[in-house]
Image (cartoon, rainbow, N blue to C red):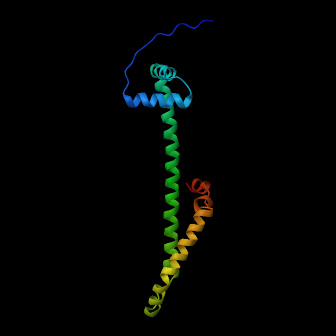
Amino acid sequence: MKQPKKRRLSVYLDPEIMATLADYAARRDHSRSLVAEAAIASFLSPDAAERQEAAITKRLDQIDRCIARIERDAGISVETLAVFIRFWLATTPPLPEPQQLAAKAQAGSRYDAFIAALGRRIAQGPKLRQEISEDVARQES
């Protein structure tokens, strides 16, 4: 079947838009006319708004899940720190003055060892959040 003859349309584009159109068409190995026609058809399509809304909704759902994971991980971090501090305060007696000076002298090297161990743990895993099941939080609720 013979396609109806296309009609010519002249439009004026900003140089930036024209460059973007030409670049896009070249990367896709299509003519600028074909890309412009598809863009106009999409713009005029009655379901374009619905497709855009669906895409935005999908992205918002992804962002929502990501934020929920961040909140969970932050909660685990805060609780882990709180448990450690309570344990440390309950089990560590204060040092006498002469021993405090010796402990302060060792603090730098002990901190460096801690940072090195933390770096290895982060690089090699597993992460603490991976060791804690998400089911635990759901069961306690």
Report x, y in % for residue 47.
49, 22
Asked if residue 111 is positioned above or below residue 9 in the image, the reply reads below
Report x, y in % for residue 122.
58, 63
Residue 45 visible in the snapshot: no
Residue 122 visible in the snapshot: yes
Q: State the residue in front, 108 or 32.
A: 32
Q: State the residue in front, 107 or 67.
A: 107
Q: Name the residue located 50 percent from the left edge and 21 percent from the top edge.
A: 38
Residue 33 falls left or right of residue 11: right
Report x, y in % for residue 70.
50, 53
How many numbered tags mark residues here?
0
Q: State the residue in front, 19 or 74.
A: 19
Residue placed farthest to the bottom in the image? 98
Quarter occupied by residue 96: bottom left
Q: Name the residue located 45 percent from the left edge and 93 percent from the top edge.
A: 98
Q: Name the residue located 56 percent from the left edge and 67 percent from the top edge.
A: 119
Report x, y in % for residue 41.
48, 19
Q: Quadrant of the N terminus?
A: top right
Quarter occupied by residue 104: bottom left
Q: State the residue in front, 11 or 119.
A: 11
Q: Quadrant of the C terminus?
A: bottom right
Q: Name the residue located 60 percent from the left edge and 57 percent from the top edge.
A: 136
Asked if residue 26 is positioned above or below residue 84 in the image, the reply reads above
Asked if residue 3 is positioned above or below residue 38 in the image, the reply reads above
